[in-house]
Amino acid sequence: MTASADLAMVNLDSSDPAGHAAFYHRLLGWEITHSQPEYAMISGGGTSIGFGLVEGYQPPSWPDPSGTKRYHLDLYVDDLATATQEFVAAGASKPDFQPGGDKWVVLIDPIGQPFCLSPRPKS
């Protein structure tokens, strides 16, 4: 293959783009670069995450043995327990099913989409 591409950004379906962007702004500290009811965006670290309104959006269930999960974000944190507490206080929830044991934590964002917290690699 001779063609190559660069990731411009990630766009995620959402039932509440502005609220979704505000939640991840709080977790990641990225700037909210656009916020309207139908589309919002945060930017940082050289990339952006967009959140687009999808009418009738239904989040996947967790766990979902049928495999309908559409995406998930993996976030590095310095301390799993502290980050879990802070992110739950910010609006996430922690489901009972935790497949990572003590290696990572699955949380559910305010619109129902799972995301994972992993320890930041030691450099």
Image (cartoon, rainbow, N blue to C red):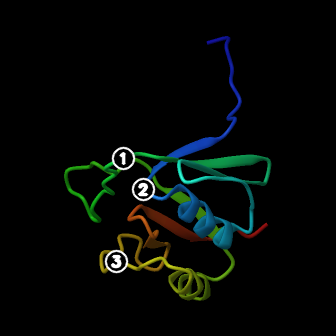
Looking at the rendered structure, the secondary structure element under dot 2 is: loop
Name the residue tied to disc 1. 55
Asked which secondary structure carries label 3, the reply is loop
Side of 66 relative to 59 (left or right): left
On the image, the x and y values in percent for residue 80 come to: 58, 81
What x and y, as percent, mark residue 91?
A: 50, 79
In three-dimensional space, the C-alpha distance between marks 2 and 3, rounded to whole angstroms, equals: 20 Å
**Viewer-nearest residue: 27 or 64:** 27
Q: Residue furthest front?
A: 37
Quarter in which the C terminus is drawn: bottom right
In which quadrant is the N terminus drawn? top right
Disc 2 crowd rating (10 Å Cα; few below 14, some 14-19, many 20+) is: many
Relative to 92, say whether 24 is above or below.
above
- Residue at left offset 56%, top offset 43%: 11
Q: Quadrant of residue 63?
A: bottom left
Residue 38: % across, % down: 53, 48
Q: Secondary structure at mark 1?
A: loop
Please name the amino acid that badge 3 sits on.
Pro
Residue type pointed to by label 2 = Ser
Residue placed furthest toward the top:
2
